[in-house]
Image: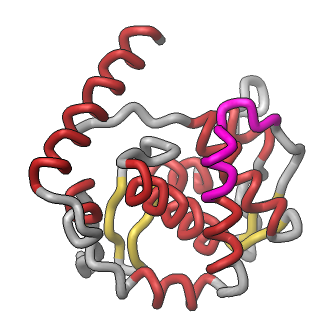
Amino acid sequence: MPLRFREDKATQAAARLLQLGGGRMNLMKLVKLVYLTDREALVRWGRPITMDYLCSLRHGPIVSNVYNLMNEQPDPADPRYWHRYISERANNYDVHLLAVPTADQLSRLEEEVIGAVFAEHGNKDQWGLRDFTHTLPEWRDPGSSMLPIQIRDILLPAGYTEEEVDQIEAEMEHVSQVDRALR
């Protein structure tokens, strides 16, 4: 099911995590924390925050579009929303806040999830987060490749029924279709 990635929400969520972490963070740590916020929102409400493509890599699950943004060279003449607020990665694989975006696309509850995930996992370094995400039921070792993570891979082990997962997937597909039609 192709979801419509929300770069604005992903940027605002990542910026909030960076703020909580002191403004600078290892990119693998940040991508894992964004993944965990999406995962937590999905388990709590049946929808992720960023609507990103989820996949398993050798070092654990990630949000694919966020990962790509972190590794993308920004266009100085026309920077993407992400690159207006979050730096390109430095030689030591860190990113930092360039400016603090408004959180106008995040709900109060989404901001609470971001805070809760950071409170639980923000003290871990990138390797501790990698090890933790390897324990999640949706992660499968893809070797040197990548494997998609389906929403049901997260929701069924979290206690949702097949019927509930089918309904959530249908609702998310509908929202994605409407969002694509409006943009």
Residue 141: image quadrant is: bottom left
- Using the image as rendered, state which of residue 45 and residue 122 is in the foreground: 45
Above-or-below relation of 127 to 113: below
> Which residue is at the far top?
182
Above-or-below relation of 180 to 95: above
In the rendered picture of this protein, how many numbered marks are placed on residues? 0
Above-or-below relation of 94 to 108: below
Residue 153: give x, y in percent of width and height.
Answer: 22, 64
Q: Is residue 44 left or right of residue 169?
A: right
- Using the image as rendered, state which of residue 15 and residue 155 is in the foreground: 155
Q: By what rule are the colours in the image chosen? A: secondary structure
Q: Is residue 171 left or right of residue 47?
A: left
Q: Residue at x 75, y 51 (%)?
A: 15
Q: Residue at x 66, y 86 (%)?
A: 125
User: Within the magenta stretch, is there residue 112?
Assistant: yes
Residue 54: image quadrant is: bottom left
Extent of the magenta region: 102-113
> Which residue is at the far left?
162
Using the rendered image of the protein, determine whether residue 73 is visible from the camera's viewpoint.
no
Residue 21: image quadrant is: bottom right
Q: Quadrant of the N terminus?
A: top left
Q: Residue at x 36, y 87 (%)?
A: 135
Q: Is residue 169 left or right of residue 111?
A: left
Residue 149: give x, y in percent of width and height.
Answer: 26, 60
Above-or-below relation of 172 to 16: above
Residue 140: give x, y in percent of width and height.
Answer: 24, 77
Using the rendered image of the protein, determine whether residue 177 is visible from the camera's viewpoint.
yes
Q: Residue at x 51, y 66 (%)?
A: 36
User: Within the magenta stretch, is there residue 143?
Assistant: no
- Using the image as rendered, state which of residue 121 and residue 46 is in the foreground: 46
